[in-house]
Amino acid sequence: MAFGLFKKSEKKPETTNTHYHELTVKKIIPETKDSISLVFEQPASGQLKYKSGQFLTLIATVQGKEVRRSYSLCSSPFVDQDLVVMVKRVDDGLMSNWLPDNLKVGQKVRVLEPMGNFTTEYGKDGKRHLIMFGGGSGITPMMSILKSLITQEPDSICSLIYCNRDIDSIIFKNELEHWQTQYEGRVHVIHILDNAPMNWQGYSGLLNKDMLAKLFERIPNWGLEKTTYLMCGPEGMMKNVETLLSELHIPKENVFKESFVSGIIDKDKKEEKKAATVSGNTAHEVTVRYDGQEYKFVVEPNRTILETALDQGIDLPYSCQSGLCTACRGRALSGQVKLDEEEGLSQSERAEGYVLTCVGHPITDDVVIEIG
């Protein structure tokens, strides 16, 4: 299983890079009072290939500046013809508020090709149990994976434990009920609400060890060899779930998570972290190989590889600029790169030499990075 899951220049050159696509908005579907689904038509040049659990990076000009944000695909490549992402408003969210306020059906949106490692392969002979923990907008990759698993592996099952603020905050509520009804016995959906209504028959409050034990009594037990645990949602929720699973002696290799980030980091804290990370005041030359081209440039102290490349008009892939979405991931073929943030990479990826250019600093002169 492959679950593993991403200071620009003011002016960037026009590009014909095949990693970019223009998608037309086909529908805008209200999901809750603060979330919408954006349905995109497949590009005329041919279907965009993606894996369940991956994300699209949407690119738009907001307040005169290019902004990029990653949104997980909630559509399944096996079930849905169109590409669908869900956008939820957040306080001070630049893109998450701009999209529902400004985007219209028929408009075109520039995107990077689908990326992300929160994925798995499917086979008709597969037989496994995926137990998913979702919180709020963390349901999006889970929705894609659920649909793919149930339709592609007839002997596999899925249990979703979905945490929300209240009943009106449940995204895809009707669709989840549909899948649970249509595939009775194979799809189990359990809702947990922070603020439950008076007539609520389900679980409410904070997910704790006692509640988790009761939840596990309600869903099938297929044993550790056939069970995988997935989580996506607020960082606090995921840390809590990780702790609870650890207390139940669930091996770490059975647990996978996807982190959502806003892409906004306090500038002073970011600079402090860089200063603490980079030793000395020496600039280093870096070679980056991307899309059939080779670029050489010097990275100054306390500057990241991505910042330097973008300032020189080199159009490398990126999205969150926080070291979590992995859109900027590349493999260091030589040299040493220090990262401000390693959360986005798995232990095996780090061992294989993968780095993130958005939080990466060269600390030797022989750094060669291959992207893609």
Image (cartoon, rainbow, N blue to C red):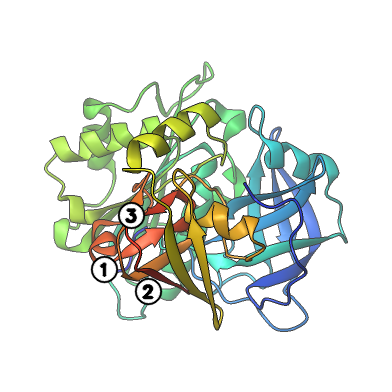
The type of residue carrying mark 1 is: Glu
Residue in the foreground of this view, choosing between 330 and 43: 330
Q: Secondary structure at mark 3?
A: loop
Marks 1, 3: nearer the viewer: 3
Residue marked by disc 2: 121
Asked whether residue 35 is in view, the answer is: no
Foreground tag (1 vs 2): 1
The residue lying at 41 percent from left, 53 percent from top is: 360
Q: Earlier in the sequence, mark 1 or mark 2?
A: 2
Left or right, residue 177 beside residue 208: right
Residue 363 disc label: 3
Q: Provide residue 104's location: percent of width, then percent of height.
A: 86, 52
Give whichever of discs 3 and 2 has the lower sequence position.
Answer: 2
Q: Position of residue 181 (x, y in %)?
A: 50, 54
**Picture quarter containing residue 97?**
top right
Residue 73 lies, in percent from the top left, at 58, 59
Badge 2 crowding class, 10 Å Cα cut-off, few under 14, some 14 to 19, many 20 or more, is few
Instruction: Check disc 2 and give the amino acid type.
Output: Glu
Name the N-terminal-most of marks 1 and 3. 1
Q: Residue at x 22, y 28 (%)?
A: 209
Residue designated by label 1: 352
Q: Disc 1 to disc 3, how far (Cα)? A: 18 Å
Residue drawn at (52%, 16%), measured in percent from left and top? 198
